[in-house]
Image (cartoon, rainbow, N blue to C red):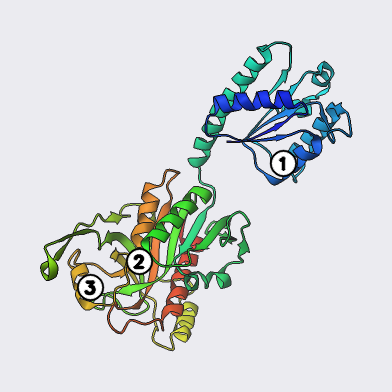
Amino acid sequence: MKTLVAHDRPEVAQTIKAILEELLPGENVITIVEDGVASREALRSTLYDFVILDLTLPYIKSKSSADYTVAENLLVELFEGETLNVPGDLIGVTKDKVALEKIDTRIGAHLLAIIEETEGEDWLARLKDRISFARKAARSRLLSIYQQHDYDVAIITALDEESAPYADIFELSELSRWPGAKEFLFTDMQGSIRRGVIFSVGRAGQASAASASQALLTQFRPSLFLMSGFCGGFSTKTQAGDVIIAESVFDWDSGKWKGEGENAKFFPRPEPINIRDTKAHHVARALVQSKLSNSDAVIGKASALSSGEISNVSFKLGPIASGSAVVSNTAIISRIEQLNDKMLGVDMEAYAFFYACTSTRVIKPSYLFIKAVADFCDIAKDDRLHSACCFLSASVVAEILSKRWQF
């Protein structure tokens, strides 16, 4: 908990600090200020969970006398202006009975409590009681917030080139509270304005994808979470440019090596995660059975980006494999295909993404993995189709958001 103690008498401020440290051991960061100017600057620069405010502060310590109007003006700016960060809870304290009488209902209503500093320790007991209550209330609010969706959608990509097409689809703006994340608005199938956020991890791999996915879930709590980009497909089941929607994901490199030296053998122990019978699964099935609303335009651009190699948009819904290494070896592909005879392809982030969505401690989202086949995981693997596949998967995401998903 971040706590601000604003009091012009150091001995009282230190007493309050001692109480906070007693009630909140090891979990409180306490800032002490002595006048109105310092209080305002602290509230402008920092978001506090808890504030204890002397209602008779001087405007500037040693240069002005203590007056209730300083605290009153500060509170008016705090709750009616837009320049200061409103704390989770605020307690007013004062030994001036006149200040108690003059704090009007407009300001007093915003305070958790107003405590008169009296002789003896009775007022400290009341302060302890209010601090304990504020702590419980803060925890309850946090639990409540974590069980409510905030953003309508979040989109995550592993690489920057996978997120690049969204700059032409949505009007993106930087999010100051999350470096690298971009916010956007869109219109859903009902004509309502919705809010989304997109983030590129900037590197491939399970660990980074899991960490970023969980962080996005906690920070933005999206109702729908999507991963897009390019992946490898299996040549017996897919063609270049096919858009794979993962029905289930197998962690293909999870298992145990047994044996010694050249006789060592890998025994897989995958724990697949699937979306069957969910709202996201129903939307995916409907998409597979139809086509994009702007199919001709999408195919035209994909063809141009791929120098004519991609001339159609086809959807595949089924299992994929996900592991921590790039695969460009037919022997490894054969081993992966043995995990499930319907396996469509392989990527490096899907399992981490699915796992984060199913194991998050905040409210869980609906989620979909949507990537287009850019290669066949063999010796001919290259990046010539990356741009086209990134565009295709982003176009499918845009179609889902604007025409397929019921928020």
Q: Earlier in the sequence, mark 3 or mark 1?
A: 1
Tell me where residue 350 sits by quadrant: bottom left
Q: In front: mark 2 or mark 1?
A: 1
Residue 141, quarter of picture: top right
Relative to 403, residue 63 above or below: above
Q: Which residue is mark 2?
A: 348
Please give the count of numbered marks on the rendered protein. 3
- Crowd class of label 2 (few under 14; some 14 to 19; many from 20; radius 10 Å): many
Q: CA distance from mark 3 to mark 2?
A: 14 Å
Give the residue pinned by disc 1.
42
Q: Which residue is mark 3?
A: 333
What amino acid is at disc 3? Ile
- Foreground: 301 or 20? 20
Residue under the point 63% across and 57% down: 176
Quadrant occupied by the N terminus? top right
- Badge 1 density bin: few <14, some 14–19, many ≥20, Cα 10 Å: some
Q: Earlier in the sequence, mark 2 or mark 1?
A: 1
**Disc 2 and disc 1: Cα gap in Å?**
44 Å
At which x and y percent is residue 224? 46, 54
Q: Which mark is residue 123?
A: none
Amino acid at the residue labelled 1: Ala
Please provide percent x and percent y for residue 403: 49, 62
Give the percent coordinates (x, y) of residue 343: 24, 67
**Can residue 282 be seen?**
no
Is 34 placed above or below 242 here?
A: above
Please tell me in which quadrant of the rendered image residue 122 appears.
top right
- Label 3 element class: helix
User: In the image, what residue occupies the spot 25% across and 54% down?
Assistant: 271
- Helix, strand, or loop for circle 1? helix
